[in-house]
Image (cartoon, rainbow, N blue to C red):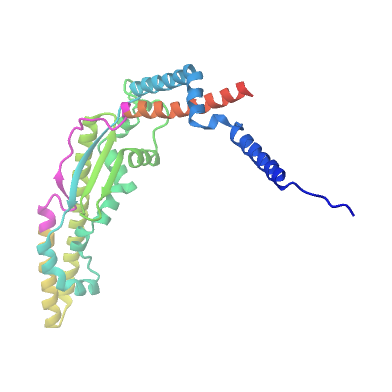
Amino acid sequence: MPTIKYNTNKLHKALLNLLLSDETKMTTETPKDGFLDIMGLVSIFLNQKVLIISIVLLVSSTTAIYSLLVEEEWISYTTVVPGENPDIKSSSGGLSGLASSLGVVNVTSEVSDIDKNIAILESRYFLNKFIRDNDLTKVLFSERWNSADNKWITSEPSESEIYDLFFGELLSVNKDRRTGVITIGIRYKDPFFARDTVNTLLEEVNAYIRADLINKSKRNIEFINKNLEEAAQKETRNSLSSLLRSELNELMVAETLDDLAFRVIDPAFIPKQRAYPSRTRMVLLAAFISFFGSLFIAFFRERNIHS
């Protein structure tokens, strides 16, 4: 039987040449998606620079014109802290149990309840009353009011519309939970109106809460006097007398302090810088967004040309 002889040297050389040829093909092969590398992006930018620059200039100039035409808005702030009297709190603290058992409202605790006072400030009833008392509806809805004929062009705004506009767009109330400092602001197209409104709003909410507390304190005093006349035991009469003195003290404080609910730290002032629009920021943001948007347009346009 004939034997077959293999030349190992020649076989090794053939395999080596085959491997080298495959590697050469792999390294010299050009990727199909050349648009995705950096040089491809630079090439796209150079080829489509007129389109990209035109889009950026068009969007930026349109934004600049809009920012000049849009109505300016200003925000005036006032800084307040809770109004409270620690002397009354300490003197009436021991009588809170007796007051609760008799159904007497603790006026002092309501004075220091800042969250409740903020809720009153933001309430639909108080804000509608404030707007109505100061005749602000015609100002807030000036586009619907005919000052020459002294009548509404369309239907008169409802209380729901008035509240939604004032509370949703004009009024801002922010409380720092750590320090307890409260910032109350009014946003409007007239900086003088914003300042005057926030100052008046603070005065009237203080007066509203103060009047409510005075009425409650007077009712408490009347109720205690009635129970004092009917009390037979000496111990009960002494407790009621102490509670009466405390209520009289609270009534005196409520009638003498104007800033019972909110104490002003920094009154509202005329803002020097408008809140809206921020023209420089708007133009820069428009240029940034339009630049990257135009790159995408140029990319797909260049890809369609090559395909």
Q: Is residue 290 left or right of residue 137?
A: right
Frontmost residue, 174 versus 202: 174
Question: Is 212 included in the stretch rendered in magenta?
Answer: no
On screen, residue 232 above or below 283: below
Q: Compared to 30, does 12 lie above or below?
A: below
Instruction: Give the mark count.
Output: 0
Point 16% across, 65% down: residue: 221
Query: On the image, which quarter does residue 301 sit in?
Result: top right
Please report the residue visible at 30 percent of the width from the left and 52 percent of the height from the top. 119
Choose top left, top right, bottom left or bottom right for residue 98: bottom left
Q: Is residue 16 above or below residue 296?
A: below
Residue toward you, 193 or 77? 77
**Residue 35, located in which quarter of the rendered image?**
top right
Quarter of the figure with the C terminus: top right
Q: Position of residue 269 (x, y in %)?
A: 17, 35
**Magenta stretch: residue 264 in it?**
yes
Which range of residues does the magenta coloring cover? Answer: 253-280
| Residue 86 x, y percent position in the rendering | 12, 62
Residue 159 in picture, x, y percent from top left: 37, 41
Measuring 16% from the left and 78% from the top, which residue is drawn there? 231
Residue depicted at x 42% and y 31%: 155
Q: Left or right: 14 with respect to 84?
A: right
Residue 48: tell me if it is visible: no
Residue 51 seen from this side: yes
Quadrant into which the N terminus falls: bottom right
Judged by its main secondary structure, the magenta piece is: loop
Picture layout, residue 113 above or below residue 50: below
Q: Position of residue 106 (x, y in %)?
A: 21, 65
Drawn side of residue 174 relative to residue 62, left or right: left
